[in-house]
Image (spheres, rainbow, N blue to C red):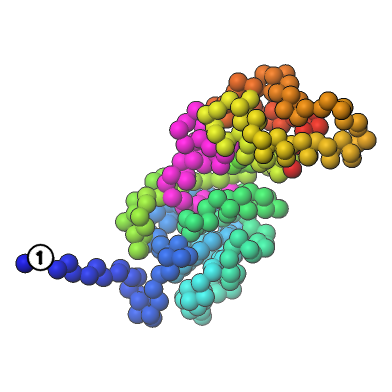
């Protein structure tokens, strides 16, 4: 007779379970339960007593409480109102209450106030947009110590020539210095995620490089569509040529430049790539300086990506 498999019981944080609150996977809720890792993240962030700290997805407040001990103020951004209530209850009637500000809502749609430092175990599904929201935030913050899915973290720190080197790598490294701090096993979370995790430190470049980021992003988007192809091949795509030709005509119109009757956008781009000695280069081996020079070469000839 075939065996009947017993149903697996979902693992739920005991204290929260008592209140009928279960973690919502749609919000990427995996609570970091290991106090040693929380302490290590806070130590590596270099918190100061005068700091205003931002935490994204505080969950049940395990990291929040430890952080409140070390800084002047914590701004916690939480989308789940059930966990907001839990966090408020946890600090109610304590000296921490006056030091905690809770922003309720989606962090990607929230206008973030000033903060000195960000320490967070973030929902992994918002990793990429959140990184760039933080890096484009003004005024500048000192650094961020963030927990990511391990492969995403490896992409952030990948160097030219690495297998995981991609547009995310070059765009992040243009705006910040990124360092891998530590790996974190899935059993340090409740409930355990399906992937391993890593903690990285992101330090914004201040002042930022003198680059229009929208232009930069447009260039790297084209180059990394097929990162193993030469740039000469990448820029021959018909949709790419159509967009660049339209942008060039707008540029000429704004600067009262005549466009020759025999104008050929494909030839112009090839000429720029050849002159810049970039036609045989491949995105997977190009660093920030290579892309800066290339962007300058295009812009100086009236080719824009925004």
User: Going by the image, does 12 lie left or right of 299?
Assistant: left
Q: Is residue 165 visible?
A: yes
Q: Is residue 50 visible?
A: no
Q: Is residue 158 magenta?
A: yes
Label 1, secondary structure: give it. Answer: loop
On the image, the x and y values in percent for residue 300 come to 80, 29
Q: Residues within 10 Å of mark 1 (few under 14, many from 20)?
A: few
The C terminus, quarter of image:
top right
Q: Residue 115: which quarter of the image?
A: bottom right
Please name the residue shown 39% across and 46% down the image: 183
User: Going by the image, does 262 lie left or right of 86?
Assistant: right
On the image, the x and y values in percent for residue 269 come to 72, 27
User: Going by the image, does 305 lie left or right of 201?
Assistant: right
Please name the residue shown 82% across and 27% down the image: 263
Residue placed under numbered mark 1 in the picture: 2
Q: Residue 23: which quarter of the image?
A: bottom left
Looking at the image, residue 104 lies above or below residue 121? below
The N terminus, quarter of image:
bottom left
Residue situated furthest left in the rendering: 1
Q: Nearer the viewer, residue 271 or 301?
A: 271
Q: Is residue 186 magenta?
A: no
Please name the residue shown 67% across and 53% down the image: 137
Looking at the image, residue 28 lies above or below residue 102? above
Q: Nearer the viewer, residue 217 or 201?
A: 217
Q: Which residues are magenta?
A: 143-170
Q: Nearer the viewer, residue 14 or 96?
A: 14
């Amino acid at each position: 007779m075939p065996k009947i498999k017993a149903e697996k019981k979902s693992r739920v944080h005991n204290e929260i379970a008592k209140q009928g609150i279960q973690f919502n996977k749609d919000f990427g809720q995996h609570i970091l339960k290991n106090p040693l890792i929380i302490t290590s993240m806070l130590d590596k962030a270099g918190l100061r007593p005068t700091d205003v700290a931002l935490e994204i997805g505080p969950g049940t407040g395990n990291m929040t409480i430890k952080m409140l001990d070390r800084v002047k103020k914590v701004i916690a951004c939480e989308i789940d109102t059930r966990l907001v209530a839990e966090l408020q209850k946890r600090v109610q009637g304590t000296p921490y209450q006056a030091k905690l500000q809770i922003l309720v809502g989606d962090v990607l749609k929230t206008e973030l106030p000033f903060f000195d430092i960000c320490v967070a175990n973030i929902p992994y599904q918002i990793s990429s947009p959140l990184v760039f929201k933080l890096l484009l935030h003004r005024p500048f913050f000192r650094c961020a110590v963030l927990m990511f899915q391990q492969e995403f973290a490896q992409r952030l720190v990948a160097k030219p020539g690495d297998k995981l080197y991609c547009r995310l790598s070059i765009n992040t490294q243009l705006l910040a210095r990124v360092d891998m701090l530590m790996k974190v096993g899935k059993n340090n979370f409740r409930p355990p995620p399906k992937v391993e995790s890593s903690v990285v430190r992101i330090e914004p470049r201040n002042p930022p490089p003198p680059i229009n980021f929208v232009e930069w992003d447009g260039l790297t988007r084209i180059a990394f569509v097929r990162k193993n192809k030469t740039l000469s091949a990448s820029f021959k795509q018909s949709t790419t040529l159509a967009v660049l030709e339209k942008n060039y005509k707008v540029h000429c119109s704004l600067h009262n430049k005549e466009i020759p009757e025999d104008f050929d956008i494909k030839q112009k781009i090839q000429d720029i790539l050849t002159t810049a000695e970039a036609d045989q280069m491949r995105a997977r081996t190009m660093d920030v300086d290579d892309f800066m020079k290339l962007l300058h070469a295009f812009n100086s000839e009236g080719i824009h990506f925004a």
